[in-house]
Amino acid sequence: KIDAKGRVSVPARFREILEEQEARTIYARVATSGPAIVAGGPAWIATLHGMVDDHDPTGELHNDFAYTLLGDTVELTVDTEGRVTFPENLLRYAQIGETAAFIGLGSYFEVWEPQALEERKMKARRATKERGGHLRATGNGGAKP
């Protein structure tokens, strides 16, 4: 639930991950996966910076990635009670009203309007079933195409 001051509790597991990174800061922006907020800690934002920096800084691809992944990212502090206040423009983009649903996605999480999240998960399950056999484990625990 989002309280009257617009604060929402960050799930305990993600707060633990932040503590492991010795941080109380999350970085948030609009998601590219749908009407949601995507957020992560310092390690996540460092990964995004690295992904952008791997491209020619004078090129269009670099600029598109920079605008999309970093340009509108905001830095938010998790308060002592584990809550964060997302800016109104992010809540509006995600169509979040009084309740929000969190989903952990590895090194980051997304925040959705609850019904929209259920629809997104169903869509992902259908797509995964259709692409069965494409996900392969690699030696370092990741996946290869």
Image (cartoon, rainbow, N blue to C red):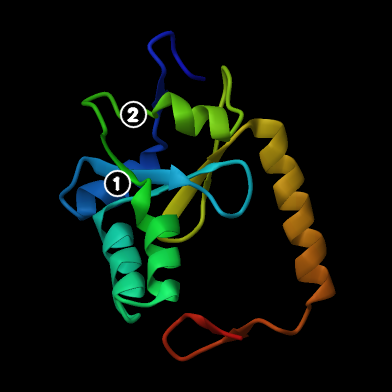
Camera-near label (2 vs 1) is 2
- Type of residue at label 2? Val
Q: Could you tell me which quadrant the C terminus lies in?
A: bottom right
Q: Is residue 32 left or right of residue 29?
A: right
Tell me: residue 22, above or below residue 134.
Answer: above
- In this view, the residue in front, 75 or 113, is 75
Seen from the viewer's position, the closer of residues 21 and 38 is 38
Whole-Å distance between the Cαs marked 2 and 1?
Answer: 15 Å
Mark 2, other Cα within 10 Å: few <14 / some 14–19 / many ≥20: many
Marks 1 and 2: in contact by CB < 8 Å? Answer: no
Q: Amino acid at mark 1?
A: Glu
Label 1: which secondary element? helix
Q: 10 Å neighbourhood of mark 1: few (<14), some, or many (≥20)?
A: few
Residue 110, horizontal then vertical, whole percent: 51, 46
- Which residue is pictured at 45% across the width and 65% down the height? 64
Residue 62 figure quarter: bottom left
SS category of the residue bearing label 2: strand
Q: Is residue 74 left or right of residue 31?
A: left
Mark 1 lies on residue: 16
User: Is 11 or 118 nearer to us in this picture?
Assistant: 118
Q: Residue at x 35, y 65 (%)?
A: 48
Residue 41 on image: x %, y %: 30, 51
Q: Residue furthest top?
A: 4
Q: Label 2 belongs to which residue?
A: 84
Q: Relative to 129, say whether 67 is above or below.
A: above
Residue that appears at 75% across and 84% down: 133
Horizontal side of 43 relative to 91 (left or right) equals: left
Using the image, determine if residue 131 lies above or below residue 124. below
Front one among 83 and 57: 57
